[in-house]
Image (spheres, grey):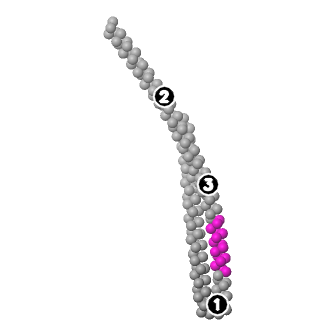
Amino acid sequence: MAKVNKQLELLLRIESEKEQQFATELQSAQSFLQAGQTKLKQVQSYKLEYLKRMQAMGDQGVLGGNYQHFQRFIVQLEAGIKKQIEVTETSKQVLQQRKSVWLEQSKKVKAVQTLIDKKRNQIQMVMDKEEQSISDEFASQKFIRNKIAAANQVS
């Protein structure tokens, strides 16, 4: 039984290390997603600010070349936003995949821990039975000795 427990303890340690690694990867994916979402908001905010400046300049009268420059830059910002949206969506998918992997590994760790607990309970029950048996045997022998001693005192 001790060998089985050592093997299970080793398995638990290995599976727990995997779980920790997957948790770290999950946390990394979460951080990457948050950074991507922040960057997306910044680019969108910058585009909005730029559009406002362009409109203000339009109200004051903008030369054609400058207006075309503004329009090209807006197109570049929109392309950047589209790209960042794609990155964010991919990051969400990666995060979901890593979460699934981590959850599966967590289930494995819990299953091994449950098995170890079950084995420990079985061992404890065997030890309790042996202890009870020894205690019963001792009480039985004491009873017999007392009975023999009482019979010898009567004689």
Q: How far apart are marks 3 and 1 (CA)?
A: 52 Å
Q: Which of marks 3 and 1 is nearer the N terminus?
A: 1
Residue marked by disc 3? 101
Tell me which residue sits at (58%, 73%) in the image: 41
Say if residue 61 shows up in the picture: yes
Q: Where is residue 43 in the image (x, y as percent from the top left)?
A: 59, 76
The one nearer the camera, 63 or 141, is: 63
- Who is closer to the viewer here, 148 or 46? 46
Spatial CA distance of label 1 from label 2 is 93 Å
The x and y percentages for residue 117 are: 52, 40
Q: Mark 1 points at which residue?
A: 66
* Amino acid type of the residue tagged 2 in the rendering: Lys
Magenta highlight: main SS: helix
Single out the mark in the foreground, 3 or 1. 1
**Label 3 close to label 2 by CB (< 8 Å):** no
- Magenta range is 75-90
Could you tell me how many numbered marks the image carries?
3
Would you identify the image quadrant in which residue 115 lies?
Answer: top right
- Foreground: disc 1 or disc 2: 1
Label ID, residue 129: 2
Q: Position of residue 29 (x, y in %)?
A: 59, 62
Q: Determine whether the residue tagged by mark 2 lies in a helix, strand or loop.
A: helix
SS for dot 3? helix
Q: Quadrant of the N terminus?
A: top right
Query: Type of residue at label 1?
Result: Asn
Was residue 50 drawn as part of the magenta stretch in this picture? no
Amino acid at dot 3: Val
Q: Along the polypeptide, which appears first: circle 1 or circle 2?
A: 1
